[in-house]
Amino acid sequence: MKRSVVALVLLFAACNSKKPQFVVGDNFSVWLPEATTKTTSTNDEGLPETNWEVKHTGLTTAEFYSVKLSCYHEVLNPNDELQSNEALLALNGIKSIEQRRFDIVAKETGRSVPALFAVTRETATGNVLNNVHVVDGHCLITVGARLNNDNAGTVARVVSSVTIFK
């Protein structure tokens, strides 16, 4: 009897546990802490835009992780796309804390893909968001994660997991 109760408890816990997953696009992957909600829309050029999100709202904190892929007709200029507009951020109640440009090296080809790591703070709430923006030819990939007191390791894993294939 005791063994069957223990087995049932373990089975229930396994079924309800968070299962990490990789969001995989045509040329990229990103690790997220659990299954996502996927939505599609169109961008300002009428082309498909895909968004994957994990969102939980608790009593004192909220978890938020996202991956957004948007492609355009023209090849994107990394110097334009990875340049922060401090005035626009301030108008929206956001303060830039840290920015760092870097390259992601494609696994299969060794090609360098320009990226920006950015940390921002919402001035009204104090919420801190970590983001990685990647310019890959015609496409912009944005990975975001909200930093809370108890999820720093998960946020670090999400933003450092961006992989380009070719």
Image: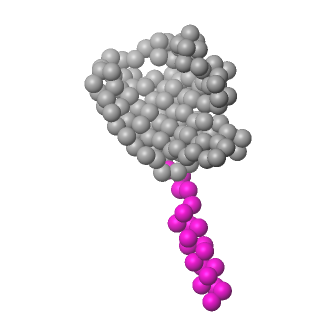
Q: Nearer the viewer, residue 27 or 111?
A: 27
In the rendered image, the quadrant that contains the C terminus is top left
Indicate the position of residue 147 as horizontal and vertical percent values. 65, 36
Furthest residue toward left: 46
Q: Residue furthest right?
A: 149
Residue 35 visible from this viewpoint: yes
Kindly indicate the quadrant of the structure image that contains residue 45. top left
Magenta stretch bounds: 1-21
Height in image: 93 above or below 11? above
Q: Which residue is painted at 60% across and 36% down in the image?
A: 146
x then y, percent, for residue 99:
63, 20
In percent of width and height, residue 142 lies at 49, 30
| Picture residue at 40% right of the left edge, 43% below the top | 38
Q: So how many labels did they put on this image?
A: 0
Instruction: Classify 29 as above or below 76.
Output: below
In the shown orientation, is residue 32 left or right of residue 24?
Answer: right
